[in-house]
Amino acid sequence: GAGVSQSPSNKVTEKGKDVELRCDPISGHTALYWYRQSLGQGLEFLIYFQGNSAPDKSGLPSDRFSAERTGGSVSTLTIQRTQQEDSAVYLCASSLRGEQTQYFGPGTRLLVL
Amino acid sequence: SQQGEEDPQALSIQEGENATMNCSYKTSINNLQWYRQNSGRGLVHLILIRSNEREKHSGRLRVTLDTSKKSSSLLITASRAADTASYFCATDGAGGTSYGKLTFGQGTILTVHP
């Protein structure tokens, strides 16, 4: 596709509910990243996928957060039992293998009430 | 946690003036990148400078890197109202790793008045 797309653009949920955020990377990009941007913490790395390798999950803040990438393309970030502190913009990025530049999607703005 | 800090946190200038933003980081890096963000949404890559480079230009952008001081600066010359955005530095390779896990600074909010 022309760029990284994310859905939904905005999500409002109630505390305790599960949410799924989707990312479609640029076609042919083997690397995919999730970041979180919040007022208190700035931009934080969450998880990184590279091809068929095991993902780097070192940035996930708790075991309520998980992500998968199916077929080396689309990725889903799942937050279980959401808390108010999960409210943030969740950004996805992709890049070509070996390339340093990352291409970001428009983000999903999550609000947990 | 953030790799470094950016300074100033906010910058307000008139169209035509130059804008300079600074970034400091804490650990060794492979490269440093600058990104721009409009309205709290997606980031757009501006420029990348490698650890063995000292200065790089792209259009109205000039980036410097001083690895001895662990700092970088972004200069935007002849600013335009359309340059109004948040600007972030991001480092790659903290701790010697070479893949693309980026660590971002806190960002500088630039406002250019017409």
Image (spheres, helix red, strand yellow):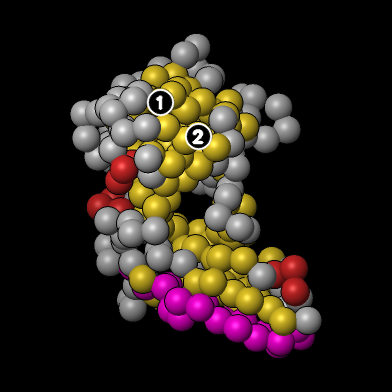
Quarter of the image where the C terminus of chain B is located? bottom right
Residue at position x 53%, y 20% in the image: A74
Classify 10 Å Cα crowding around label 1: few (below 14), some (14-19), many (20 and above): some
What separation in Å lies between label 1 and label 2 (alpha carbons)? 8 Å
Q: Is residue B20 magenta?
A: yes
Q: Nearer the viewer, residue B50 or A92?
A: A92
In the rendered view of the protein, which quadrant contains the N terminus of chain B? bottom left
- Do badges 1 and 2 share one subunit? yes
Counting residues from the start of the chain, the first of labels 1 and 2 encountered is 2
**What's the amino acid at mark 1?**
Val
* Residue closer to the observer: B107 or B4: B107
Q: Amino acid at mark 2?
A: Lys
From what the image shows, is residue A47 above or below residue A72? below
Q: Position of residue A102 (x, y in %)?
A: 54, 44
Residue B36, position in %: x, y? 59, 60
Tag 1 subunit: A
Depth check: B10 or A10 in front?
Answer: A10
Q: How many marks do you count on the picture?
A: 2
Residue in view at x 25 percent, y 52 percent: B95
Q: Position of residue B18 (x, y in %)?
A: 67, 85
Residue A30 shown left or right of residue B104 in the figure: right
Q: Residue at x 40, y 63 (%)?
A: B105
What subunit carries mark 2? A
* Residue furthest left as drawn: A63
User: Which residue is tagged 1?
Assistant: A19
Q: Is residue A51 visible?
A: no
Residue B9: give x, y in percent of width and height. 45, 76
Residue contact between numbered discs 1 and 2, judged by CB atoms under 8 Å = yes
- Which residues, given as a range, are shown in magenta? B6-25
Q: Residues within 10 Å of mark 2 (few under 14, many from 20)?
A: some
Residue B19 lies in the magenta-colored region: yes
Q: Check disc 2 and report the residue beneath it.
A: A11
